[in-house]
């Protein structure tokens, strides 16, 4: 199966049980609800959506840090949904949002980066280990001087570089980046984005890049998926996201982003969505967005919209879009 | 003496920590008039929050104002005793924080807290205060305020709590509203709701607003004037158009350039500001931005740049402007 994509998720569902003690009935958080996507070798798939919509849960589930409730995970066309992950770990890595919490404060930066090498017994001796660590630090713009220092001596941006070096230690070909820049200052974010893109060019890694900043996601990604309450409502090429957003939620999300240009801000008309995101414990029937959608119709309240292909590489799940296109 | 609503002169605030003196605010000067919206931007740790906490005498230990003056409505704020400042806080000056739970008390209903605030600062009866509370909740866009006012803060969503806090600050018709990262913890669609609300309010109440944020998009959306802070100093100040279309300081220019452009296709790399954020415990001798500045010159390493007037109400603190003006720069 040489033409299989590097990574594929098929109908991933992840529910979390909440409650269910002696006194309360068990209820379920429908964190990820039937999400499918493919990522090609060396490409970036950007995942956006509001807090709690299931981005991190999806990212962790496809790495099997959570076991999926149902669905299939494929790497190189091989079903790994139930496979032993230990040999696969080195191919699939994750970088977390919080560069403060994700590094062990008692370990030197060198040991943090070297730990995955040790676990996988990847080096033949002290010397090779040291060389590999140095090489990794250099890749992320750090050097030998940083090797024996501790995380607290580093700024947020530098710590995020350390996490990325660590994730890359075993040359993964797929990396989930879960909001890797959200905790960083604007002036530092660009450094980390550039570095991730350079590394991708050099080493050919694929990323699932999770963020809530659409501008950043658009910049770094080839394809972008928009999530709402556990579902993928639209997927398209990053470039057509601004040119041709189809789903009413994508449109609202785009129009909610403040644009750093006073004239554009003054002149543009915004769709301001009413209300809050409903709870994923009791998501609305039919289209989950109908409680906030300015175009909601009767059918939206009753029937879950199916995902349709608008143009090659552009899918969307909305009754209105389907009607408008006469499909 | 002064006819500005708020006048801050050479404000200096330090934290006296075991590791040394942290000069969090290092000579900040600005004024603000009624009805104007001032944005303060800068990276985390640049002194944005500390500068406004000082204004309200809300500095956390071991922080202390070590120099300068603050006048609000012609009164010397730093000379006020606890009682006097208490009378202004929550009445003439309202504060909105990033985390609404810092000003909402979890054990009282929203209504109890609204009534309590009103009764402290006005002579209203309980019933009048309750009615005014309902009106305010309606004004900030909370549906069904008659029922909502009886609920506890934890029964509100994040966006609703932020609205409730805004309602609370509006109760006594403040002259100045300080909002410190009011939407940073919120989702973009909820942020858009709150920004819409703030825009509507500025038309309706004519208060001055100070909006602290790290999001240049928000600044461009709502502010009249902008202050850019770096390492405890104002490095540039101007109208919103000055800052976005005629940025003068290398840090401001860098901030604007490092954002992904809306019309880019992602093939061009971003232009980051190199280096790491400043360490206030080890400030360089000259310009604090020098270690990251592409334009850094010899003089920058030894001497603090003075303030240069770039135009009406537009200032920048950078040695480059001396060069542009053909001024002699004395090396020391
Ligand atoms: N271990 C868990 N137990 C119960 N519920 C969970 C658990 N982890 C996540 N959830 C719930 O699943 C939903 C999706 O959470 P997730 O962390 O994936 O969101 P997210 O899109 O990453 O949000 P954010 O942008 O805030 O990071 C949320 O409602 C969350 O509360
Ligand atoms: N309670 C405190 N103790 C010691 N240092 C503090 C304290 N509060 C703030 N600082 C320091 O003052 C500086 C400015 O902080 P702040 O005004 O909160 O920055 P921001 O611009 O992010 O709002 C920072 O270096 C911060 O570490
Ligand atoms: S299916 Fe209906 S409610 Fe859902 S987004 Fe489309 S129009 Fe709106
Ligand atoms: S004073 Fe010098 S170092 Fe500082 S911003 Fe200006 S050019 Fe750069
Ligand atoms: Mg998350
Ligand atoms: Mg702050």
Image (cartoon, rainbow, N blue to C red):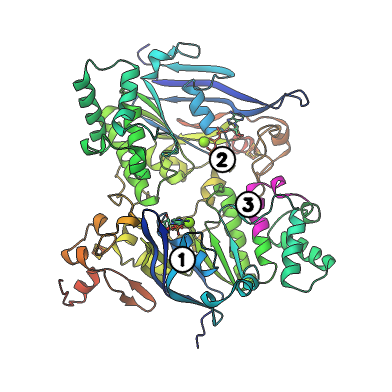
Of B143 and A106, which appears nearest the observer? Answer: A106
The part of the image, by quadrant, that contains residue B112 is bottom right
Q: Chain of mark 1?
A: B
- The quadrant of the picture occupied by the C terminus of chain A is top right
Q: In terms of image quadrants, where is residue A144?
A: top left
Q: Residue A243: where, in percent of width, then height?
A: 45, 45
Element at badge 2?
loop
Is disc 1 placed on a helix, strand or loop?
A: strand
Residue B64's disc number? 1
Residue sitting nearer the eye, B156 or B120: B120
Residue drawn where x is 56% and y is 29% of the image: A308
Mark 3 Cα-neighbour bin, 10 Å: few <14, some 14–19, many ≥20: some
Residue at 50% across / 67% down in the picture? B54
Closer to viewer: mark 1 or mark 3: 1
Read off the residue under disc 3.
B101
Span of residues in magenta: B151-165
Q: Residue furthest right?
A: B127
Q: Is mark 2 within 8 Å of ligand 1?
A: yes
Residue B161 part of the magenta-drawn span: yes
**Which x, y percent locates residue B311?**
34, 77
Tag 1 and tag 3 share a subunit? yes
Provide the residue designation for mark 2: A51
The residue closer to the viewer here, A49 or B294, is B294
Circle 3 marks a residue in which chain?
B
């Amino acid at each position: 199966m040489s033409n299989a994509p590097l990574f594929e998720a098929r109908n991933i569902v992840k529910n979390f049980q909440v409650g269910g003690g002696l006194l309360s009935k068990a209820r379920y958080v429908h964190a990820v609800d039937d999400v499918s996507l493919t990522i090609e070798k060396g490409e970036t798939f950007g995942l956006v959506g509001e807090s709690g919509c299931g981005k991190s849960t999806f990212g962790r589930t496809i790495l099997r840090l959570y076991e999926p409730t149902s669905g299939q995970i494929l790497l190189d066309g091989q079903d790994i949904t139930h496979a032993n992950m230990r040999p696969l770990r080195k191919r699939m890595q994750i970088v977390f949002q919080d560069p403060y919490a994700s590094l062990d404060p008692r370990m030197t930066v060198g040991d943090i980066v070297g730990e995955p090498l040790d676990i996988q017994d990847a080096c033949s001796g002290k010397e090779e280990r040291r060389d590999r660590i140095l090489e990794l630090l250099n890749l992320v713009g750090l050097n030998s001087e940083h090797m024996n220092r501790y995380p607290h001596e580093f700024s947020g941006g530098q710590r995020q570089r350390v996490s990325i070096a660590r994730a890359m230690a075993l040359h993964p070909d797929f990396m989930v980046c879960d909001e890797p820049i959200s905790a960083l200052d604007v002036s530092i974010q660009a450094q980390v984005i550039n570095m991730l893109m350079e590394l991708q060019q050099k080493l050919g890694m694929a990323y699932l890049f999770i963020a809530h900043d659409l501008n950043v996601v658009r910049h770094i990604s080839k394809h972008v998926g928009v999530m709402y309450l556990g579902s993928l409502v639209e997927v398209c090429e990053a470039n057509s996201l601004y040119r041709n957003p189809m789903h009413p939620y994508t449109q609202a999300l785009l129009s909610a982003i403040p644009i750093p240009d006073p004239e554009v801000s003054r002149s543009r008309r915004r769709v301001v969505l009413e209300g809050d995101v409903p709870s994923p414990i009791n998501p609305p029937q039919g289209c989950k967005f109908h409680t906030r959608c300015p175009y909601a119709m009767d059918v939206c309240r009753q029937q879950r919209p199916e995902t349709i292909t608008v143009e090659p590489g552009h899918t969307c799940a909305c009754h209105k879009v389907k009607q408008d296109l006469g499909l | 003496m002064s006819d500005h609503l708020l006048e801050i002169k050479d404000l200096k605030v330090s934290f006296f920590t075991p590791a040394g003196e942290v000069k969090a605010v290092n000579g900040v000067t600005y004024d603000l008039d009624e009805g104007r919206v001032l944005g303060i931007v800068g990276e985390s740790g640049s002194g944005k929050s500390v500068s406004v906490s000082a204004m309200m005498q809300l500095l956390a230990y071991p922080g202390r104002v070590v120099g300068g003056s603050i006048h609000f409505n012609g009164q010397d704020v730093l000379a006020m005793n606890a009682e006097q400042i208490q009378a202004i806080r929550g009445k003439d000056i309202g504060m909105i924080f990033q985390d609404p739970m810092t000003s909402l008390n979890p054990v009282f209903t929203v209504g109890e807290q609204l009534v309590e605030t009103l009764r402290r600062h006005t002579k209203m009866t309980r019933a009048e205060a309750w009615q005014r509370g309902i009106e305010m909740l309606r004004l900030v866009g909370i549906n069904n305020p008659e029922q909502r006012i009886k609920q506890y803060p934890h029964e509100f969503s994040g966006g609703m709590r932020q609205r409730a806090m805004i309602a609370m600050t509006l109760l006594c018709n403040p002259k100045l509203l300080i909002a410190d990262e009011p939407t940073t913890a919120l989702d973009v669609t909820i942020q858009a709701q709150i920004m819409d609300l703030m825009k509507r309010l500025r038309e309706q109440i004519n208060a001055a607003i100070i909006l602290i944020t790290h999001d240049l998009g928000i600044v461009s959306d709502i502010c009249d004037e902008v202050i850019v802070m770096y390492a405890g100093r104002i490095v540039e100040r101007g109208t919103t158009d000055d800052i976005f279309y005629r940025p003068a300081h290398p840090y401001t220019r860098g901030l604007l350039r490092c954002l992904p452009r809306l019309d880019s296709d992602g093939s061009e790399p971003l232009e980051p500001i190199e280096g790491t954020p400043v360490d206030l415990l080890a400030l360089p001798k000259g310009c604090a931005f020098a270690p990251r500045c592409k334009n850094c010159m010899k003089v920058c390493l030894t001497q603090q740049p003075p303030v240069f007037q770039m135009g009406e109400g537009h200032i920048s603190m950078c040695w480059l402007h001396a060069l542009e003006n053909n001024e002699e720069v004395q090396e020391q």
